Image: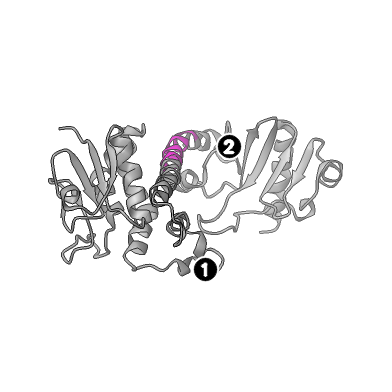
Amino acid sequence: MTISFLVTHSGGFHADELLSTAVLARLFSEAKIIRSRDDAWISPAPDRIVYDVGRACDAEAMIFDHHQRDAPLRDDGQPYSSFGLIWRHYGRDYLCDSGVPQAHVEQIHREFDADFVLPVDLMDNGALNPSVAGPLLADLTLPVLLDTLKPVFDDPDPEAETRAFHTALDIARAFVEAAIHRKAAKYRAEAVVLQAIADAGASRVLELPRGMPFRAAIEKAGADHLLFVIHPRDKDWALTGIRKSGDGFEQRADLPAAWAGLTDAELERVSGVQGARFCHNGRFIAVAASREAVVRMSTIAVREASLST
């Protein structure tokens, strides 16, 4: 069976069918995108996937709408949008096509559904207001940003809606791909970090071969003794703190207060470390010119952190 058409509704677009199209267009790259409300197009047929239109949800018939009274709900009763329905049915195939190792597919499928797909579903169904992001961020949520790409009401060009849809689709695709790549990278990094933790033993400082996500792996290993991480960074070395949680900025230990905001010669003088180059005013990252210098800085940071507890 060949999918020749990806069919969604015409007119104003929203995040759910844009993101659905981003997923489906990768899997069925030769299929033509059709935007229509014509019954001849939005009725199920073997050559098409119909989504966000059609007033039915039947995976076998390849129609995925959520506007009808008997629209499917998640196990916890929360509503799907077309994006959630498409991700539920085609998400695993999308991950495999994106090069995600089979061992990580299920976990990434669940994570992406929970932190990327679900908010879109809820916003599309009016079950979540963008204002929950706060007054400064409400207009910067992905669904709202994609909405801003619609043509203005008095644009006379009959092709404006179609052009805007495809512009928004490129952006939606980029966000989906980036989110998946980052999640896949987190699992690749995990193996490296866990091995580094084992090699570090009782040291309070973890050395990594390069910059990479590390906090989740540190938590998984139960390495509560670790306070700082060092790693090479282009032509220099970085010394970073370890955040206590993923949704806050509090560190297990801050870098020395005397270093805050200093650079180059002044930081060398105050720290006593030749090659010290920079310390952020927030005391969560510092930079040194060499591994030797960053190790010395990390030793001082551990000593001061220990004295302050």
- For label 2, the crowd category at 10 Å Cα-Cα, with few meaning under 14, some 14 to 19 and many 20 or more, is some
Residue under circle 2?
A: 211
Amino acid marked by disc 2: Gly
In this rendering, would 95 be left or right of 168? Answer: left
In this rendering, would 268 be left or right of 290? Answer: right
Q: Nearer the viewer, residue 13 or 303?
A: 13
Residue sitting at x 59%, y 54%: 252
Secondary element at tag 2: loop
Spot occupied by residue 259 in the image (x, y as percentages of width and height):
78, 50
In the rendered image, which quarter contains the C terminus?
A: bottom right
Residue under circle 1?
A: 134
Is 5 a magenta residue?
no
In the rendered image, which quarter contains the N terminus?
A: top left
What secondary structure do most residues of the magenta stretch adopt?
Answer: helix
| Quadrant of the image occupied by residue 236 | top right
Q: Earlier in the sequence, mark 1 or mark 2?
A: 1
Q: Nearer the viewer, residue 55 or 140?
A: 55
Magenta stretch, residue numbers: 180-192
Q: Nearer the viewer, residue 66 or 292?
A: 66
Residue sitting at x 39%, y 54%: 115
In this rendering, would 81 be left or right of 139? Answer: left
Spot occupied by residue 213 in the image (x, y as percentages of width and height):
52, 42
Placement of 245 over or under 209, stated as above or below? below
